[in-house]
Image (cartoon, rainbow, N blue to C red):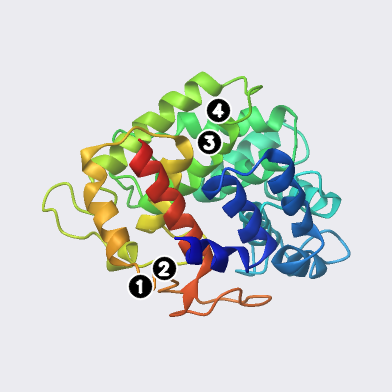
Amino acid sequence: MPQLIDWLMAGDPAIRWQTQRYLLDAPDPVWRAERQRTAAAGWGAQFLAHQDADGRWGGGVYSPKWVSTTYTLLVLIDIGIPPSCGAAQRGAHRVLDELLGAQADAAFRRQLAGLDRCIVGMALQIGVYFGIDDARIDRIVENLLSEVMADGAWNCRRHRRPQPHHSSFHTTLNVLEGLRIYAEQDAGALKTDVLAAEQQAREFLLQHRLYKSDHSGEVINPKFTMLSYPPRWHYDVLRGLSYFARAGAPRDVRLQDAMALLKSRRRQDGMWPVQQRYAGKEFFIMEKTGSPSRWNTLRALRVLRWWEAA
């Protein structure tokens, strides 16, 4: 383990501050100082350098994938760029203003109702993380809470034809990550309702053991079992487990298959790789597919730490 920690600490500031905080229990001033460096050095600074003059990235808010403003900000959130970063805040306002509207008026509600739940979950995460504090945030949360399907989770195709009768793993994780960051804000007016919705959606995932059919026990999608980073809008087992760990969910026997799968993906050197990459434009590649991944190793070790302590 010491060699593995040394390897993580030799990486980008994004990896170092999270290793210090979540694996080493470093004092707040130590990891916070390292986190501040993400805006001036490494991956965070590289992404910020690609911002357009108008505050967007890649010339668009949601497209082109994966260089648009939305997907760039999601990676910056993972990196831990300080929420007070002015450039990122500017981009966050562009996301909410252009995807939904500048005010929580009737036009905003219509746009919100017609947007895919995946994108709504992303917009919530971006808005809350970068400190957008107006009526639009609670309207977004209210919309997500009203769109829960009968099985307890979400599907971005709910209002399309043919209408789905089953929630989507992809949509559910995008929504849950947005609700989680909202729930972590003590001032959230709908926090109690959000916590209840999270618990209900976790039950949906647990009924499927995070990647299996609840009827046959077969793997739903082989891609769910392969580790990626960045995940973009896609679901995989490590993304699901990372959410459970972040939420501090109780240990559940129905997670054992997913934990066993995660452990089976570990290399002999103790690291985890990037096993799949989603096609699209990229400003630069943080880690090569097939190589040992500091991102996935950090995330997997956080999951293991939570699992052993739960």
Q: Is residue 45 left or right of residue 155?
A: right
Q: Which residue is mark 4?
A: 142
Check contact, mark 2 vs mark 1: CB within 8 A: yes
Q: Given the image, on which type of amino acid does mark 2 rest? A: Trp
Q: Residue at x 34, y 32 (%)?
A: 250
Q: Given the image, on which type of amino acid does mark 4 rest? A: Glu
Q: Characterize the local packing of mark 3: few (<14), some (14-19) or many (20 or more) Cα atoms within 10 angstroms.
A: many
Q: Which residue is mark 3?
A: 179
Q: Characterize the local packing of mark 1: few (<14), some (14-19) or many (20 or more) Cα atoms within 10 angstroms.
A: few
- Disc 3 versus disc 2: distance between alpha carbons? 28 Å
Q: Which residue is mark 1?
A: 267
Between marks 2 and 4 in the image, the one whose residue lies nearer the viewer? 2
Where does the image place residue 53, in percent across and percent down from the top left?
Answer: 88, 65
Tell me, for residue 272, which label it has, or none: 2
Q: Given the image, on which type of amino acid does mark 1 rest? A: Arg
- Disc 2 versus disc 4: distance between alpha carbons? 38 Å
Q: Characterize the local packing of mark 2: few (<14), some (14-19) or many (20 or more) Cα atoms within 10 angstroms.
A: many
Task: Indicate which disc, 2 or 4, sits on the residue closer to the N terminus.
Answer: 4
- Disc 3 versus disc 1: distance between alpha carbons? 33 Å
Question: Which picture quadrant has residue 154?
Answer: top left
Where does the image place residue 289, in percent across and percent down from the top left?
Answer: 47, 79
Tell me, for residue 150, which label it has, or none: none
Q: Is residue 249 left or right of residue 51?
A: left
Image quarter hosting the N terminus: bottom left
Viewer-nearest residue: 214 or 161: 214
